[in-house]
Amino acid sequence: MTSLVLAPAALALVFYTPLMIFSYIAALIVLVGAWEWSGFMGLKKIMHRSLYVVVIAAILSALHLHWPIQSLWQDNKLLSDANYLFTVSVAWWLVATALVWQYPSLSKSWNKGILMRAIAGFLTLIPLWLALNALRSASYDESTLHGSILIMIVLGIVWSADVGAYFSGKNFGKHKLMPNVSPNKTIEGLAGGVIASTLFILIFCYFADIAKDKWFLYASVTVFIAVFSAVGDLLESMFKREAGLKDSGRCLPGHGGILDRIDSLTAAAPIFVAFYAWTLNS
């Protein structure tokens, strides 16, 4: 029942909301995620958790004033200073990969106090909001649906990776991927997810009449994004494990919290924007 509500709501948000309304709703989703992330930090009191949300809201407000959604692109090029934030985001996800890969041996570097976990939340959630804004507003003057299609491509990569990982892991999974972080995930599942997402993008290229000389580039980028979408999932699992939580929240009946639904997207969307701005849109 939750999915029956979420799916059309997501499509309506991506395709039919004006740019500014889209930006506000994306910010609201991120702020709900910030509330859940405050639980990863070990915060218990409502006042303390609310303070973390307020801090992220203030940062989003400042970024909104500096980079209004309608002015993120100039002559189909992402603003250079916005590009810097996505560079930082890519660097963060490389660091996050190391943290997940070396868990729990590296956990002592961040799990003792709340500051490092708070910063991890900033680096995970804030670029997601800017990435969604950048995708939705891309080439908006030329086509109001161009950005919507870009978002659906990212979602398609994430969803196909999830589906492929589920079926491949269920039927062929024998070797644990990172048992200390998520015992049920397997190397075979990850491989199946990468293959499924690559097939998705190649099918998209075929039906969208993308020049064949670009197919290899698109597929290669997709492999990279699919792998990091798995890292996004594993990062949230790692923080939940440290906090002793099964789900990030309870706002979505049968699905847990917002972060349980968008954990893969937190990595996939900023990295997709980085590649789109640096390579695919060149």
Image (cartoon, rainbow, N blue to C red):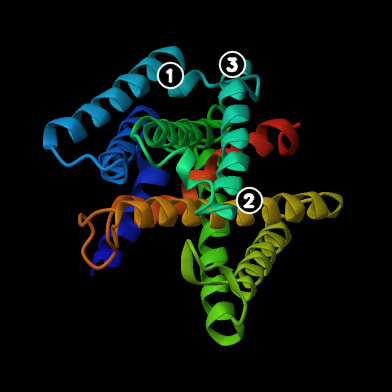
- Gap in Å between the C-alphas at discs 1 and 2? 26 Å
Look at mark 2 in the image and give the residue it sits on. 225
In the figure, is residue 147 to the left or right of 281? left
x then y, percent, for residue 212: 84, 55
Residue farthest along the bottom direction in this orientation: 171
- Gap in Å between the C-alphas at discs 3 and 2? 22 Å
Question: Residue 68 bears which disc, if any?
Answer: 1
Q: Earlier in the sequence, mark 3 or mark 1?
A: 1
In the figure, is residue 224 to the left or right of 138? right
Q: Could you tell me which residue is drawn at 47 percent across and 65 percent down?
A: 182
Q: Earlier in the sequence, mark 3 or mark 2?
A: 3
Q: Could you tell me which residue is drawn at 55 percent across and 38 percent down?
A: 270
Q: Is residue 163 above or below residue 64?
A: below
Residue farthest along the top direction in this orientation: 66
Q: Are marks 3 and 2 in contact (CB under 8 Å)?
A: no
In the figure, is residue 223 to the left or right of 177? right
Secondary structure found at label 2:
helix
Q: Earlier in the sequence, mark 1 or mark 2?
A: 1
Q: Is residue 198 above or below residue 23?
A: below
Type of the residue with mark 3: Asp
Q: Could you tell me which residue is drawn at 17 percent across and 42 percent down?
A: 44
Secondary structure found at label 3:
helix
Type of the residue with mark 1: Pro
